[in-house]
Image (cartoon, grey):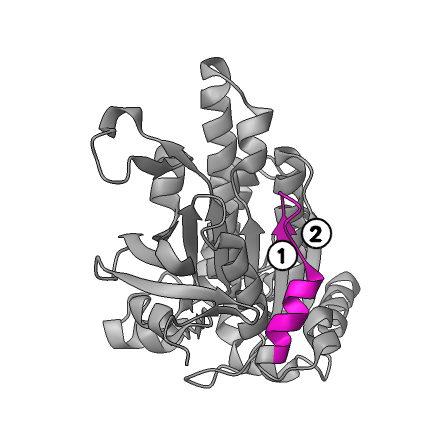
Amino acid sequence: METAALDLIEEEKSTTTSEENLGDLEEEECFFQDIVLLLDQGIAVDDVKRLKDAGINTVKGVQMTIPKKLLEIEGFDDKKIVKINEACTKVSFVNSFATAQEVVQRNQIFKLSTGSTDFDKLLEGGIESMAITEVFGESGSGKTQLSHTLCVTAQMPGPNGYNGGKVIFIDTEHTFRTDRLRSIADRFNLDRNGVLENILYARAYTSDHQYQLLKNVGEMLHREAGVFKLLIVDSIISHFRVDYYGRKEMAHRQHRLGQLMARLHKISEEYNIAVFITNQIMSDLNNLEQSDPQRPVGGNILAHASTTRISLRKVLNGKRIAKVYASPNLADSEVAFTITSGGIDNVNIN
């Protein structure tokens, strides 16, 4: 194999096989098939480098990118793209058929606890990986409190061999609070500093900045394959409501929002992590006679992009109600929870 190709392979090994994450790589190898494997299928080393420069680092990442986007890469044409896709098919199991049982075994889906066992039961175990979970509700309904609780529970071991992992938090509303994380860590008897060290935080100042941060997230997840288990965006819509205003900008806003959600889907499936987003609400003037005439912002774009949607609302005595708003597998039901100094918890905690 030519020297340039060998150098590319050695460079990739040096960035992804440290002692710290070697076990994760072995366990989740099927998720992180690096595109250097395409070299064995006759793909030129320069083309593999171009893919990496475009932020496409895995075989699955290539398969999740439409030809139109690949054509934007300098030096790529239709013939070359067909050859690359054929090479991806040869080295990846993604496009092969499998029984439903094999799908379960391959996906290695894990679930993260909300901090409340009652809430977890509503979600059949918790926040699911390889999916986008959206929660929406009025101010003070518990959206950000749930985000902070998940920052801690994601680091804890769980069922089915889940060993915990690091968290990425993208903050669009300046709601991130380290003091809150410390008190939640105390509840679970975790080292405060250790918990904070395992959370990678970024503040997004505009919708464009938010989109750029997500592009960087993909590269980071590839460098530290299997290390990060949760990506939080709190909230997904706030900048879009400010940056795009009025009917004239609505189409552009929804298109850009759709691109962002597509990137989140790609991240969740390519790297097997849980994506958790919060959303805001607006009054539905067409249904004022309903008991709750409020609906999530984002229209059909968010409605179709989110895997599971959960509504949160405040009730009497400091309780909150979580209700399954839309889901492909969860029953249409609700549960009460409360917010304590240690985060989200059951109502009857005593």
For the residue carrying disc 1, how many other residues have a C-alpha within 10 Å: few (<14), some (14-19), or many (20+)?
many
- Residue 66 located left or right of residue 104: right
| Residue 103 falls left or right of residue 42 | left
Percent position of residue 342, x then y: 56, 72
Kindly check if marks 1 and 2 are in contact, taking CB atoms under 8 A apart as contact: yes
Q: Identify which residue is drawn at 29% across, 35% down.
A: 293
Q: For mark 2, does the 10 Å Cα neighbourhood hold few (<14), some (14 to 19), or many (20 or more) residues?
A: some
Element marked by disc 1: strand
- Image quadrant occupied by the C terminus: bottom left
Disc 2 is placed on an element classified as strand
> Residue 169: which numbered mark, if any?
1
Residue at image position (34%, 37%) is 295
Query: For the residues marked 1 and 2, what is the alpha-carbon distance in whole angstroms?
Result: 6 Å
First reached walking from the N terminus: tag 1 or tag 2: 1
Q: Callout 1, which amino acid?
A: Phe
Q: Report x, y in % for residue 324.
A: 29, 55
